[in-house]
Amino acid sequence: MDIYVVIPVFNRLDHTKKIIECLRRQTIKNNLKFFVVDDGSTDGTDIWLKKQLDIITIQGNGYLLWGGAVDLAIKNIFKLCNIVDWVLFINNDVEIKENYVESLLEIAKKYYPASVGSIIKNNKDKIVSVGPRVLTKTLEINDLLMDDSIFINSELIKNVDALSGRGVLYSVKSLREVNGLRSKIFPHYFSDYELSIRVKRRGYRLILSKQVVVYTDENFELIKKEKKKKSIFFKLFSRKSYSLIYSKFFFWWEASNNIERISLPLRIIIFIMLPMLRKAL
């Protein structure tokens, strides 16, 4: 049994070195196979990767973004893997403890069929993100961190709405059944959530554990503020925008039930377009 580790990168070589070192120290490191997708880095990432004999590097064209990079890796992995294998998505802006992958795998096997995600902590060991709560009626995504009761009775959340791609383990079987990501529709944002929703609909549980953590020094609040500063044109039409209009529509279409889909265009206007226009004026 192998675990294929997919890491999409664009510059930030220091981050890439750190996560690779974390992965090389894993308790089940002999089961890991590294696939790094370098999407046009210009900071020497390509030169460093060529020297790493334990890493399979896939070169992108600079326009893949997260969804395209991960899907390209998956398509390559499908040619090599067995149905009993696993795939781990992890970003290069996080660090993990030595038992991280083993912990994910133990949970995924215990509750099989299951996909298992990570909670996110900062370097002060404070939880900054748990996972998404997808509210289809009002077209909102809130963090489960806002619910103080989620970890009171259990270390596990066994039926979450979606999983982040910042650190998540899928069985090869589940990824084959949904045919990977839909990177043309979801080039960057929502690509990870939408994938997990489709996997869930195939009968795989989506699980989070308080003990399975990725650590980041990213300032989430600053990132949100920077997003708000973007022009309305960027927000609606940039492939790297959280508000990319066609990605939003198809995400909510996928997340909604048949009744909710009937009113989706109207709710897109009411809950997304109008508030965005008001802020821009």
Image: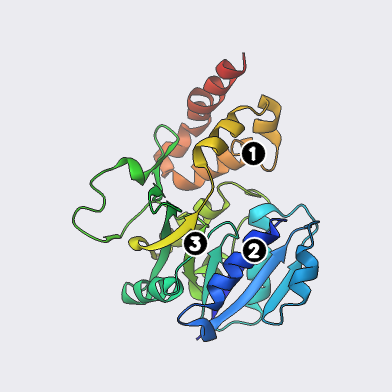
Instruction: Tell me where residue 23 appears, x and y as whole percent.
Output: 54, 73
Horizontally, residue 239 falls left or right of residue 158, namely right
Instruction: Tell me where residue 61 appears, x and y as whole percent.
Output: 80, 58
Which residue is rendered at x = 63% and y = 60% of the image?
15
Horizontally, residue 62 falls left or right of residue 175, namely right
Horizontally, residue 159 falls left or right of residue 68, namely left
Question: Circle 2 sits on which residue?
Answer: 16
Estimate the spatial distance between the alpha carbons at disc 2 and disc 3, rounded to whole Å.
14 Å
Mark nearest the camera among 2 and 1 is 2
Mark sitting earlier along the chain (1/3): 3
Query: Eyeballing the image, is 216 above or below 253?
Result: below
Which amino acid lies under the numbered mark 1 shown in the image of this protein? Answer: Ser
Q: Quadrant of the C terminus?
A: top right
Which amino acid lies under the numbered mark 2 shown in the image of this protein? Answer: Thr
- Could you classify mark 3 by the number of other residues whose Cα lies within 10 Å: few (under 14), some (14-19), or many (20 or more)? many
Q: 64 or 45: nearer the eye?
A: 45
Which residue is rendered at x = 54% and y = 47% of the image?
218
Mark number displayed over residue 241: 1
Which amino acid lies under the numbered mark 3 shown in the image of this protein? Answer: Gly
The single residue placed furthest to the top in the displayed view is 281
In the structure shown, which secondary structural element does the residue marked by tag 2 occupy?
helix
In the structure shown, which secondary structural element does the residue marked by tag 3 occupy?
strand
In the structure shown, which secondary structural element does the residue marked by tag 1 occupy?
loop
